[in-house]
Amino acid sequence: MNAETVTAICAVVVAVASLIVTVYQTHATRQHNRHSSTLTVDGTVIGAWNERNADRVRERLALRPHAVTSDHGRVIATDFDQYPLSVADFDRTEHAEAVDLITRRLTLAIRYEPRYGGENFTTVLRPLPRKRTTGEPGSQ
């Protein structure tokens, strides 16, 4: 074997190793993203925000809002801008049940822990506090 053949073989080995590492990192990132969100409705933990659990939430409603989930290993892009639940042609009166779910009953926690650890960032979408009506304890 001459020097050119050895160089070519080494280049192929390095390229294949790089490809294997890239595929592994992509798989690990997708796995991490699937386990990074937790949904709670009425104080009960439903689980990760995926299609199965979104359906469990929507089963509680008379209408069926559109849900955007992070299923099937999809990575959530940095500039992703869509509502987790939405209703086409929204009308506050007609869709009062969905408004109540989203503003008063639903908690969505998203955790971000970089693969190398240490930061453990969390953001939580919490329900709005209930407004007290006249006659309830503490209202005056």
Image: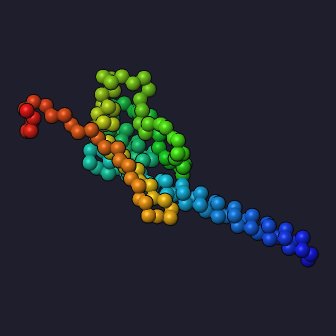
How has the structure been colored for display? Answer: rainbow
- Give the position of the C terminus as an image quadrant: top left
Q: Nearer the viewer, residue 47 or 3?
A: 3
Image x and y of residue 86, in percent: 42, 32
**For residue 20, side relative to residue 5 (left or right):** left
**Residue 39 visible to an observer of this rendering:** no
Q: Identify the image quadrant of residue 62.
A: top left
Going 39% across and 24% down the picture, which residue do you hit? 90
Image x and y of residue 38, in percent: 38, 51
Q: Is residue 6 above or below residue 28?
A: below
Q: Is residue 14 above or below residue 30?
A: below
Image x and y of residue 67, in percent: 44, 38
Going 41% across and 59% down the picture, which residue do you hit? 120
Q: Is residue 9 above or below residue 38?
A: below
Count of numbered badges drawn on the protein: 0
**Residue 134 visible to an observer of this rendering:** yes
Query: Most extreme residue toward the front, as rendered?
Result: 119
Going 21% across and 37% down the picture, which residue do you hit? 130
Query: Most extreme residue toward the bottom, as rendered?
Result: 1
Going 64% across and 60% down the picture, which residue do you hit? 22
- Give the position of the N terminus as an image quadrant: bottom right
Image x and y of residue 35, in percent: 45, 56
